[in-house]
Image: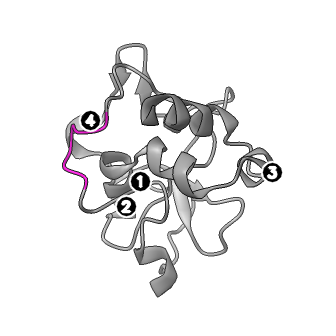
Amino acid sequence: MSTDRPETSPAAHDNPGLGASSSTPAGLVPCNGCVRCCAGDAIRLLSDDDAHKYMTVPHPFIPGARMLGRKESGACIYLAETGCSIHFDKPRMCREFDCRVVARFVPYTEARKQKIIPIWLKGKELSK
């Protein structure tokens, strides 16, 4: 269902990166309805995600990586008024993303450059 043909992800894309932790059990991040990570390009597909199940686009900053398609507003195409419309079948990084990890390891200036300040700020708030 990809909007573009998915490319094989290099091994570097297998690592969820700073925003996710494979040791973080699902539901442990206190999102409480926050959907900041559902906007922009913070979430990408990983090699163990089946890109054909989702409408995807090339990631703007990571060559060869894919991310879920976006609405004109920049929000994920699967973000509905009531939350994630693919909640029970969402990609791995969506399940494991933790903004507190971003706030802990990404300097403010880098977060500003990557245009993820709302995520970074929420991570700082939840880390208190």
Q: Distance between the residues labelled 2 and 4?
A: 17 Å
Frontmost residue, 126 versus 31: 126
Image side of residue 116 versus residue 34, left or right: right
- The amino acid on which the numbered mark 1 sits, given as a three-letter code, is Met
User: Label 1 crowding class (10 Å Cα cut-off): few <14, some 14-19, many 20+?
Assistant: few
Q: Residue furthest front?
A: 128
Q: Do the residues labelled 3 and 4 touch (CB within 8 Å)?
A: no
Mark 3 / mark 1, whichever is N-terminal: 1
SS of the residue under disc 3: helix
Contact, mark 2 vs mark 1 (Cβ under 8 Å): yes
The total of numbered circles placed on residues is 4
Say which label, 2 or 4, has the lower sequence index.
Answer: 2
**Label 3 Cα neighbours within 10 Å, binned few <14 / some 14-19 / many ≥20:** few
Question: Which residue type carries mark 3?
Answer: Lys
| Residue under label 4 | 87
The residue singled out by tag 2 in the image is 52
The amino acid type found where label 4 is placed reads: His
| Cα–Cα span, label 2 and label 1 | 5 Å
Q: Disc 1 versus disc 4: distance between alpha carbons?
A: 17 Å
Camera sees residue 88: yes
Question: Pointer 2 and pointer 3: residues touching (CB < 8 Å)?
Answer: no
Label 3 sits on residue: 113
Please state if 8 lies on the left or on the right of 88 as rendered: right
Which is nearer the eye, 70 or 95? Answer: 95
| Quarter of the figure that contains the C terminus | top left
Question: What residue is pinned by disc 1?
Answer: 1
Q: Residues within 10 Å of mark 2 (few under 14, many from 20)?
A: few
